[in-house]
């Protein structure tokens, strides 16, 4: 029986998502930047809206949402993540509300938020239905949720910290029990993802490929991870899923 694994990333690595957003070819994470961008694109116009970022961690994505003019609420069960988020937001003087709590029981009133974000969370939890039910509860009528997760490639999760990964069809079937108008985008082409993560096995300086992709993303504004299945070519595979749904 799978178990949820204690998330110690922020205790061990600090504000890692902020570090990977820095404009340095050695620290920047083009893969993460594209994930954030897909979430923001799917959210659409959020100025003046209340947006709940579930599993906000150190608040790097939460910041991007706030910069779009939203009234943002960050929620996470990690004390270290919430502490880092509060500290950084205070230093940057960015208004936001942070809540230390799990997503199985969100401490917000029903019908109280316009949008919800669940980015890279659903693959970590043992009972995703409970979280989706809570999202459905706190969303206002017609409210929008954006859910992102890695693309499943095998029955065994590729990360030791994942409980379950999803094919697009599996995710759609799960979401259909709670939401309407499900739209799924597949992004982050597998070729670029594997090159970015592993380089070329026989090439000694493997990180040079990561740095080159970072240069293209940072300075030439050509992030290959922003390619999606809307222009899919034959035998082209993707590594990321982003779903947009609406409250029933």
Image (cartoon, rainbow, N blue to C red):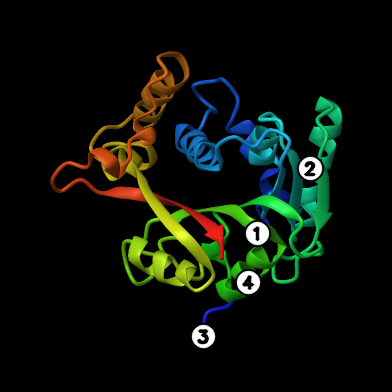
Q: Quadrant of residue 62?
A: top right
Crowding near pointer 2: few (<14 within 10 Å), some, many (20+)?
Answer: some
Task: Measure the alpha-carbon separation of dots 1 and 3.
Answer: 36 Å
Whether residue 5 is visible here, answered yes or no, is no
Q: Which residue is mark 4?
A: 133
Task: Measure the alpha-carbon separation of dots 1 and 2.
Answer: 33 Å
Question: In what element is the residue under mark 3?
Answer: loop
Crowding near pointer 3: few (<14 within 10 Å), some, many (20+)?
Answer: few
Farthest top residue in view: 219
Instruction: Give yes or no for contact between labels 4 and 2 (Cβ–Cβ under 8 Å).
Output: no
Q: Which mark is first along the chain, 2 or 4?
A: 2
Q: Which mark is residue 84?
A: 2
Instruction: Look at the picture and state if 61 lies above or below 21.
Output: below
Q: Which mark is first along the chain, 2 or 1?
A: 2
Q: Quadrant of residue 4?
A: bottom right
Q: Which mark is first along the chain, 2 or 3?
A: 3
Would you say 83 lies left or right of 30 here?
right
Task: Measure the alpha-carbon separation of dots 4 and 3.
Answer: 23 Å
Q: Which residue is mark 3?
A: 1
In the image, what residue occupies the spot 48% across and 39% down? 38
Question: In what element is the residue under mark 1?
Answer: strand
In the image, what residue occupies the spot 73% across and 35% down? 48
Rendered location of residue 34, percent (x, y)? 46, 35
Question: In what element is the residue under mark 2?
Answer: helix
Q: Which mark is first along the chain, 3 or 4?
A: 3
Q: Which mark is first along the chain, 1 or 4?
A: 4
Indicate which label's residue lies in the foreground, 1 or 3: 1
Instruction: Look at the picture and state if 88 lies above or below 82.
Output: above
Would you say 90 lies left or right of 113 here?
right
Q: Which residue is mark 1?
A: 141
Crowding near pointer 4: few (<14 within 10 Å), some, many (20+)?
Answer: some
């Amino acid at each position: 029986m799978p178990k949820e694994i204690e998330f110690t990333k922020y205790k061990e690595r600090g504000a890692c998502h902020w570090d990977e957003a820095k404009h340095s070819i050695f620290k920047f994470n083009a893969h993460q930047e594209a994930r954030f961008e897909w979430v923001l694109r799917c959210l659409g116009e959020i100025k003046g809206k209340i947006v709940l970022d579930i599993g906000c961690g150190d608040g790097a994505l939460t910041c991007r949402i706030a910069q779009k003019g939203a009234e943002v609420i960050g929620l996470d069960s990690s004390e270290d993540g919430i502490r880092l988020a509060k500290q950084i937001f205070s230093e940057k003087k960015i208004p936001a509300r942070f809540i230390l709590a799990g997503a199985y029981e969100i401490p917000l009133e029903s019908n109280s938020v316009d949008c919800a974000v669940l980015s890279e969370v659903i693959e970590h939890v043992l009972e995703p239905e409970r979280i989706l039910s809570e999202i459905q509860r706190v969303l206002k009528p017609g409210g929008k949720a954006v859910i992102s997760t890695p693309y499943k490639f095998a029955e065994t999760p590729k990360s030791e910290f994942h409980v379950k990964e999803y094919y697009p069809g599996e995710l759609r079937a799960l979401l259909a029990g709670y939401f309407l108008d499900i739209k799924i985008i597949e992004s982050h082409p597998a070729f670029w993802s594997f090159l970015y993560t592993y380089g070329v096995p026989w090439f000694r300086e493997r990180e040079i490929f990561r740095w080159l992709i970072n240069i293209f993303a940072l300075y030439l504004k050509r992030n290959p991870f922003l390619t999606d299945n809307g222009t899919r070519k034959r035998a082209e595979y993707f590594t990321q899923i982003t779903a947009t749904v609406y409250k029933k």
